[in-house]
Protein backbone atom coordinates (compact mmCIF):
# COMPACT_ATOMS: atom_id res chain seq x y z
CA UNK A 1 0.00 0.00 0.00
CA UNK A 2 1.28 3.47 -0.90
CA UNK A 3 2.30 5.73 1.96
CA UNK A 4 1.80 8.84 -0.17
CA UNK A 5 -0.81 11.42 0.75
CA UNK A 6 -3.94 10.69 -1.29
CA UNK A 7 -5.86 13.60 -2.83
CA UNK A 8 -9.25 13.19 -4.49
CA UNK A 9 -9.80 15.65 -7.35
CA UNK A 10 -13.50 16.31 -7.98
CA UNK A 11 -13.61 18.16 -11.30
CA UNK A 12 -15.76 17.61 -14.40
CA UNK A 13 -13.37 19.38 -16.79
CA UNK A 14 -10.92 16.63 -17.70
CA UNK A 15 -8.08 18.95 -18.74
CA UNK A 16 -8.19 20.82 -15.42
CA UNK A 17 -8.38 17.57 -13.45
CA UNK A 18 -5.39 16.16 -15.30
CA UNK A 19 -3.42 19.37 -14.77
CA UNK A 20 -4.06 19.22 -11.03
CA UNK A 21 -3.14 15.53 -10.94
CA UNK A 22 0.11 16.27 -12.79
CA UNK A 23 1.16 18.94 -10.30
CA UNK A 24 0.14 16.77 -7.35
CA UNK A 25 2.35 13.99 -8.69
CA UNK A 26 5.27 16.40 -9.06
CA UNK A 27 4.80 17.38 -5.41
CA UNK A 28 4.85 13.74 -4.28
CA UNK A 29 1.11 13.23 -3.81
CA UNK A 30 -1.05 10.39 -5.09
CA UNK A 31 -4.39 11.34 -6.66
CA UNK A 32 -7.72 10.00 -7.85
CA UNK A 33 -10.17 11.83 -10.14
CA UNK A 34 -13.97 11.94 -9.91
CA UNK A 35 -15.86 13.76 -12.65
CA UNK A 36 -19.12 14.26 -10.78
CA UNK A 37 -20.54 14.79 -7.32
CA UNK A 38 -21.99 11.29 -7.10
CA UNK A 39 -18.73 9.89 -8.40
CA UNK A 40 -16.92 11.73 -5.60
CA UNK A 41 -19.19 10.22 -2.94
CA UNK A 42 -18.70 6.75 -4.40
CA UNK A 43 -14.94 7.27 -4.46
CA UNK A 44 -14.62 8.35 -0.81
CA UNK A 45 -16.73 5.41 0.29
CA UNK A 46 -14.33 3.04 -1.48
CA UNK A 47 -11.13 4.77 -0.37
CA UNK A 48 -10.87 7.63 2.13
CA UNK A 49 -8.57 10.38 0.81
CA UNK A 50 -6.35 12.61 2.93
CA UNK A 51 -7.74 15.71 1.22
CA UNK A 52 -10.39 16.59 -1.36
CA UNK A 53 -10.13 19.25 -4.07
CA UNK A 54 -13.79 19.99 -4.79
CA UNK A 55 -15.12 22.00 -7.73
CA UNK A 56 -18.41 23.74 -6.93
CA UNK A 57 -19.93 23.49 -10.42
CA UNK A 58 -20.52 19.80 -11.13
CA UNK A 59 -22.96 18.09 -13.55
CA UNK A 60 -25.10 16.25 -10.98
CA UNK A 61 -24.69 17.04 -7.28
CA UNK A 62 -22.96 20.40 -6.95
CA UNK A 63 -19.89 20.79 -4.78
CA UNK A 64 -21.79 22.41 -1.94
CA UNK A 65 -24.12 19.42 -1.64
CA UNK A 66 -21.13 17.05 -1.78
CA UNK A 67 -19.46 19.07 0.99
CA UNK A 68 -22.67 19.03 3.05
CA UNK A 69 -22.98 15.23 2.79
CA UNK A 70 -19.33 14.61 3.62
CA UNK A 71 -19.44 16.82 6.69
CA UNK A 72 -22.56 15.02 7.94
CA UNK A 73 -20.77 11.66 7.81
CA UNK A 74 -18.90 10.97 11.08
CA UNK A 75 -16.37 8.82 9.22
CA UNK A 76 -15.58 11.51 6.64
CA UNK A 77 -16.19 14.88 8.28
CA UNK A 78 -12.53 15.30 9.27
CA UNK A 79 -11.27 14.97 5.68
CA UNK A 80 -10.15 18.50 4.69
CA UNK A 81 -11.75 20.09 1.63
CA UNK A 82 -10.31 22.77 -0.65
CA UNK A 83 -13.06 24.21 -2.86
CA UNK A 84 -12.48 25.41 -6.41
CA UNK A 85 -14.82 28.17 -7.59
CA UNK A 86 -15.26 30.48 -10.54
CA UNK A 87 -14.66 34.16 -9.96
CA UNK A 88 -17.74 36.01 -8.74
CA UNK A 89 -19.07 33.07 -6.70
CA UNK A 90 -18.36 34.69 -3.34
CA UNK A 91 -21.73 33.60 -1.94
CA UNK A 92 -20.85 29.99 -2.72
CA UNK A 93 -17.49 30.41 -0.98
CA UNK A 94 -19.22 31.66 2.16
CA UNK A 95 -21.69 28.76 2.14
CA UNK A 96 -18.91 26.24 1.58
CA UNK A 97 -16.81 27.54 4.46
CA UNK A 98 -19.84 27.52 6.75
CA UNK A 99 -20.50 23.91 5.73
CA UNK A 100 -16.98 23.03 6.87
CA UNK A 101 -14.68 23.44 3.85
CA UNK A 102 -11.13 24.36 4.85
CA UNK A 103 -10.05 26.70 2.07
CA UNK A 104 -10.75 27.71 -1.51
CA UNK A 105 -9.10 28.84 -4.73
CA UNK A 106 -10.73 30.65 -7.64
CA UNK A 107 -10.46 29.79 -11.32
CA UNK A 108 -8.27 30.47 -13.17
CA UNK A 109 -5.75 29.50 -10.51
CA UNK A 110 -2.01 29.12 -10.39
CA UNK A 111 -0.99 25.48 -9.78
CA UNK A 112 1.70 26.78 -7.41
CA UNK A 113 -0.93 28.61 -5.37
CA UNK A 114 -3.14 25.52 -5.26
CA UNK A 115 -0.24 23.31 -4.10
CA UNK A 116 0.63 25.87 -1.41
CA UNK A 117 -2.98 25.89 -0.18
CA UNK A 118 -3.06 22.09 -0.10
CA UNK A 119 0.15 21.90 1.93
CA UNK A 120 -1.07 24.58 4.33
CA UNK A 121 -4.36 22.74 4.93
CA UNK A 122 -2.58 19.41 5.48
CA UNK A 123 -0.10 21.08 7.82
CA UNK A 124 -2.94 22.50 9.91
CA UNK A 125 -4.65 19.10 9.87
CA UNK A 126 -1.53 17.29 11.08
CA UNK A 127 -0.84 19.85 13.77
CA UNK A 128 -4.37 19.76 15.07
CA UNK A 129 -6.25 22.69 16.55
CA UNK A 130 -4.93 24.00 19.87
CA UNK A 131 -7.32 23.81 22.79
CA UNK A 132 -9.09 26.89 24.09
CA UNK A 133 -6.72 26.94 27.08
CA UNK A 134 -3.41 26.93 25.20
CA UNK A 135 -1.48 30.17 24.88
CA UNK A 136 -0.90 31.43 21.35
CA UNK A 137 1.65 33.71 19.78
CA UNK A 138 1.23 35.87 16.70
CA UNK A 139 3.53 38.00 14.56
CA UNK A 140 6.66 36.08 15.37
CA UNK A 141 6.07 36.23 19.12
CA UNK A 142 5.29 39.96 19.32
CA UNK A 143 1.70 39.19 20.37
CA UNK A 144 0.76 36.65 23.04
CA UNK A 145 -2.77 35.50 23.83
CA UNK A 146 -3.27 34.02 27.31
CA UNK A 147 -6.72 32.36 27.41
CA UNK A 148 -6.43 31.45 31.10
CA UNK A 149 -6.48 35.15 31.99
CA UNK A 150 -8.19 36.57 28.89
CA UNK A 151 -5.13 38.76 28.34
CA UNK A 152 -3.41 39.84 25.14
CA UNK A 153 0.10 41.27 25.35
CA UNK A 154 1.94 43.03 22.54
CA UNK A 155 5.67 43.71 22.92
CA UNK A 156 5.30 43.00 26.67
CA UNK A 157 2.51 45.56 27.06
CA UNK A 158 -1.03 44.45 27.99
CA UNK A 159 -3.59 45.56 25.42
CA UNK A 160 -6.88 47.08 26.55
CA UNK A 161 -9.33 44.99 24.52
CA UNK A 162 -13.06 44.66 24.92
CA UNK A 163 -14.34 41.15 25.56
CA UNK A 164 -15.64 40.95 21.99
CA UNK A 165 -12.29 42.07 20.55
CA UNK A 166 -10.48 39.50 22.67
CA UNK A 167 -12.82 36.69 21.65
CA UNK A 168 -12.53 37.68 17.98
CA UNK A 169 -8.72 37.67 18.02
CA UNK A 170 -8.53 34.40 19.94
CA UNK A 171 -11.04 32.67 17.66
CA UNK A 172 -9.16 33.63 14.52
CA UNK A 173 -5.78 32.73 16.05
CA UNK A 174 -6.91 29.18 16.88
CA UNK A 175 -6.63 28.31 13.18
CA UNK A 176 -4.14 30.63 11.49
CA UNK A 177 -4.60 30.91 7.75
CA UNK A 178 -8.15 29.56 7.97
CA UNK A 179 -10.84 31.91 6.63
CA UNK A 180 -13.77 32.55 8.95
CA UNK A 181 -17.00 34.02 7.62
CA UNK A 182 -18.66 36.87 9.47
CA UNK A 183 -21.51 34.63 10.58
CA UNK A 184 -19.05 32.05 11.94
CA UNK A 185 -17.32 34.79 13.91
CA UNK A 186 -20.64 36.05 15.28
CA UNK A 187 -21.54 32.55 16.49
CA UNK A 188 -18.13 32.05 18.11
CA UNK A 189 -17.68 35.37 19.89
CA UNK A 190 -21.24 36.24 20.87
CA UNK A 191 -21.52 36.07 24.65
CA UNK A 192 -24.45 36.19 27.02
CA UNK A 193 -26.17 39.54 26.71
CA UNK A 194 -24.11 40.47 23.64
CA UNK A 195 -25.97 41.43 20.46
CA UNK A 196 -23.91 41.16 17.28
CA UNK A 197 -24.67 41.29 13.59
CA UNK A 198 -22.38 40.07 10.84
CA UNK A 199 -21.71 43.66 9.76
CA UNK A 200 -20.93 44.71 13.31
CA UNK A 201 -17.96 42.34 13.12
CA UNK A 202 -16.35 44.75 10.63
CA UNK A 203 -16.50 47.50 13.26
CA UNK A 204 -14.89 45.28 15.92
CA UNK A 205 -12.17 44.20 13.48
CA UNK A 206 -11.39 47.83 12.67
CA UNK A 207 -11.16 48.65 16.39
CA UNK A 208 -8.96 45.61 17.03
CA UNK A 209 -6.61 46.59 14.22
CA UNK A 210 -6.26 50.10 15.63
CA UNK A 211 -5.28 48.69 19.02
CA UNK A 212 -2.77 46.33 17.40
CA UNK A 213 -1.19 49.34 15.70
CA UNK A 214 1.59 48.41 13.28
CA UNK A 215 0.71 44.72 13.72
CA UNK A 216 -2.95 45.18 12.86
CA UNK A 217 -2.37 43.77 9.38
CA UNK A 218 -2.16 40.24 10.82
CA UNK A 219 -5.98 40.32 10.80
CA UNK A 220 -6.49 39.88 7.07
CA UNK A 221 -9.66 40.68 5.15
CA UNK A 222 -10.79 38.08 2.61
CA UNK A 223 -12.98 40.13 0.30
CA UNK A 224 -16.62 39.10 0.25
CA UNK A 225 -16.00 36.24 2.69
CA UNK A 226 -14.63 37.21 6.10
CA UNK A 227 -11.35 37.35 8.01
CA UNK A 228 -8.32 35.28 8.94
CA UNK A 229 -5.06 35.52 10.87
CA UNK A 230 -1.84 35.11 8.90
CA UNK A 231 -0.12 31.71 9.01
CA UNK A 232 2.57 32.91 11.42
CA UNK A 233 0.51 32.15 14.55
CA UNK A 234 2.05 29.36 16.65
CA UNK A 235 1.11 27.43 19.76
CA UNK A 236 3.02 27.95 22.99
CA UNK A 237 2.89 25.72 26.02
CA UNK A 238 0.14 26.85 28.34
Image (spheres, rainbow, N blue to C red):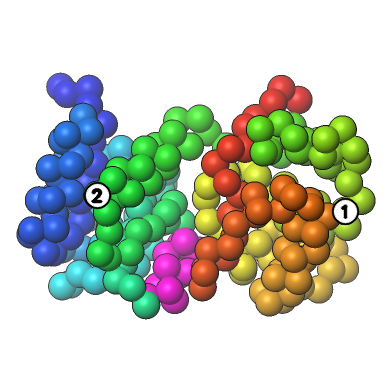
Is any atom of residue 172 visible in this view? no
Gap between marks 2 and 1 measured at Cα: 40 Å
Q: Residues within 10 Å of mark 1 (few under 14, many from 20)?
A: some
- Count of number-bearing discs: 2
234, above or below 117, in the image = above
173, above or below 84, in the image = above
96, above or below 132, in the image = below
Q: Where does the magenta region start and end?
A: 89-99
Going from the N terminus, do you reach mark 2 or mark 1 first?
2
Residue linked to disc 1: 161
Could you tell me which quadrant the C terminus lies in?
top right
Residue 14 x %, y %: 7, 59
Residue occupying image coordinates x 22% and y 46%: 8
Residue 214 x %, y %: 74, 50
Residue occupying image coordinates x 65% and y 45%: 173
Left or right for 103, reference 163: left
Residue 41 x %, y %: 22, 55
Q: Quadrant of residue 120?
A: top left
Residue linked to disc 2: 111
Contact? badges 2 and 1 (CB < 8 Å): no
> In front here: 164 or 108?
108
Q: Quadrant of residue 23?
A: top left
Residue occupying image coordinates x 24% and y 49%: 111
Amino acid sequence: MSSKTLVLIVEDEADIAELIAFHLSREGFESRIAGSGRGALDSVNRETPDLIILDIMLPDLDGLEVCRRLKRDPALREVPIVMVTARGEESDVVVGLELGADDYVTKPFSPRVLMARIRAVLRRQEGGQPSDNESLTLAGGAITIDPSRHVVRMNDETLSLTLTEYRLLHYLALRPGFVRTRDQIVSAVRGEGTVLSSRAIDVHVAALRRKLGSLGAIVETVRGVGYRIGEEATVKSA
